[in-house]
Amino acid sequence: MSTDPMLIEAMVRGIACGGFLATALIIARVDRSTTPMMGALFHFCRSAHVIAQFPPAMAMLGGWYLLVDIPSIAAAPLSWIFVTEFFGDTRSFNRSKLAVPALVLAIGLTARLLPPESARVLWLINNFINVGLFAHITATVLKSWNGDLVEQRRLAVAPLFLLNVAYGVAVALVQTVELFTFSPRQPSLFAALALVLISGISVWIFGRTTPGLFKTVPRRPVTGPSPADPQRGAAALPEAEAALVAELERLMRVERLYRIENLRISALAMRLGVTEHRLRKLLNGDLGYRNFSAYVAYWRLDEAKQALEDPEQREVPISTIALDSGFQSLAPFNRAFKADTGLTPTSYRRRALKAAGVTPLEEPEAEAGGDAE
């Protein structure tokens, strides 16, 4: 007795759909902050994609197909938002990113209203946008790879999203070929099996590691110690770890290794005489940092803030202070400073000098690197 291939694919897709929905629920239970919610929304939309890519199921929905089609179209841009927020460890969500899924949805829904031949250009634009988003996702994941201190994210979630990208690019290429050949979309058991694999890995990874994946470091106050201060909790650490923290602080505070251009965690581990894995564990588990660049930026910003607060350096250009503290240009310095303190360097200096009873100089905006309020 032969089994209907269509029935087999329907069952496989049902399993994949359930896996993505389960992942969405797992992530949604973390908290109601933006990144987990975006992750849950993306996986929900991915479950809709599983159905939308199966014409028999869409035909059964009749006029209700848009309930599945809309989230399916939004899946790719939502994956981009999730990855950039998740791997970027952003403290506040950039709402302008929502314009991307809005644009993709507008293009997709407009294309649905047009005859297939007239809609071809719109679908091509949609595919090009999605491939561009996948390219940026890949760049984001690879850029964070070396400096990521969250081992589960680096060794498990990063490969998972590269797998997601490979699937997404393959779908975009197949759909582009279909647009030029005008061949009707056919069910694909191979694609269904790929989705089952991805959904199964997603459930396994997020089900095991979710609580530690979405921890965030709160913004530091304008004044006062950092919640991720290198001395935080050092006294409570085992003797060997406390000694390592002390040596790490000496290398930063005295030798100022953070000034080294493109300082890598491997080079710092070598100076400390420990394995890279041990240093990653120390910075993440004991000191609370989620990526190495944030740790280096802490020290660079600490030096910059001390210089900005120093009355004797009030005539030193902010550009000089930024470069002396290890930043390679003003743009990343201004962004990092504003994200860390909530103030521009110019405003921070003005407030600090006034608090010290010193009259600040009126600096031209260009002198401060064009930092605007």
Image (tube, helix red, strand yellow):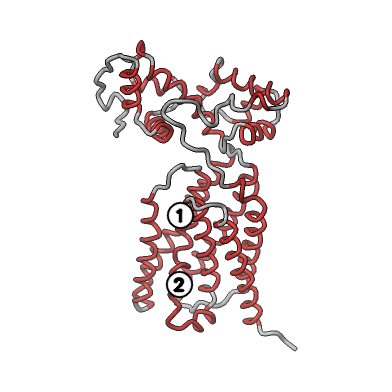
Is 37 left or right of 267, judged from the image as shown?
left
Q: Which residue is mark 1?
A: 133
Q: Which mark, by number, is residue 100?
A: none
Q: Position of residue 39 (x, y in %)?
A: 52, 56
Going from N to C along the chain, the mark reached first, 2 or 1, is 2
Marks 2, 1: nearer the viewer: 2
Count neighbours of disc 1 (C-alpha within 10 A) and say few if under 14, some if 14 to 19, many if 20 or more.
many
Q: Residue at x 30, y 19 (%)?
A: 354
Which residue position holds label 2?
A: 69
Q: Is residue 1 left or right of residue 259?
A: right
For the residues labelled 2 and 1, say whether their Cβ atoms are less than 8 Å apart.
no
**How many numbered marks are there?**
2
In percent of width and height, residue 265 lies at 60, 31
**Quarter assignment of residue 367:** top left
Q: Mark 1 is on which residue type?
A: Leu
Image position, residue 130 (x, y; %): 45, 59
Q: Secondary structure at mark 2?
A: helix
Q: Quadrant of the N terminus?
A: bottom right
Q: Is 149 placed above or below 207 here?
A: above
Which quadrant holds residue 150? top right
Q: Residue furthest top?
A: 312
On screen, residue 294 above or below 24? above
